Image (spheres, rainbow, N blue to C red):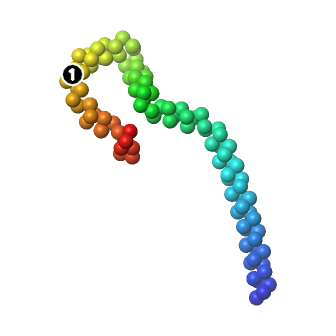
Amino acid sequence: MSTRRATLARRRGLLLEKSARLRAELGEDGAALALRFRLADRVLALARSGPLRALVIGGAALAFFGRPRRLFRTASRLLLLWPMLRPFLPKLAELWRSPRDPAA
């Protein structure tokens, strides 16, 4: 029985060494990926901020409407409706917020 116990202990030691080595390699790979995607993380964080969110929405609207003239025409129509739409902004903001981020 002591031979089996010694074999199992040796095998356990080898598995622990392999696990530590793989964990270290995984940590190094994760650090390399984090470094590679750091710029993308910053861009996404900036795009989620308040002022840039409006810029992104404006760019999407420009792409959707296709022509700036049409966008300005629509914006001027909305500007005329602004006094009527303003009371509904808090409700629209509630709809816009994601359920995961109630403070945004």
Residue position for label 1: 83
| Above or below, 74 relative to 22 | above
Looking at the figure, which quarter contains the N terminus? bottom right
Look at the image and tell me whether residue 64 can be seen.
no
Name the spot of residue 29 as percent of width and height, x first. 68, 48
Task: Classify the position of the C terminus by image quarter.
Answer: top left
From the viewer's perspective, is 78 left or right of 13?
Answer: left
In x, y percent, where is residue 82?
A: 24, 21
| Dot 1 alpha-carbon crowd within 10 angstroms: few under 14, some 14 to 19, many 20 or more | few
The mark total stands at 1
* Residue 14 found in image quarter: bottom right
In the rendered structure, which amino acid carries the disc numbered 1? Answer: Pro
As drawn, the residue found furthest toward the left would be 84
State the residue in front, 16 or 93: 93
Location of residue 32 in the rendering, given as x and y in whole percent from the top left corner: 68, 43
Rendered image quadrant of residue 21: bottom right
| Callout 1 secondary element | helix
Q: Residue at x 78, y 74 (%)?
A: 10
The reply, left or right, for residue 10 in relation to residue 86 is: right
Q: Quick one: 50 or 10, which is closer to the camera?
A: 50
Q: Please, is residue 82 above or below residue 49 in the view?
A: above
Question: What is the residue that sits farthest to the bottom in this orientation?
Answer: 1
Nearer to me, 58 or 69: 58
Which residue does the image show at 71% across and 53% down from the upper left?
25
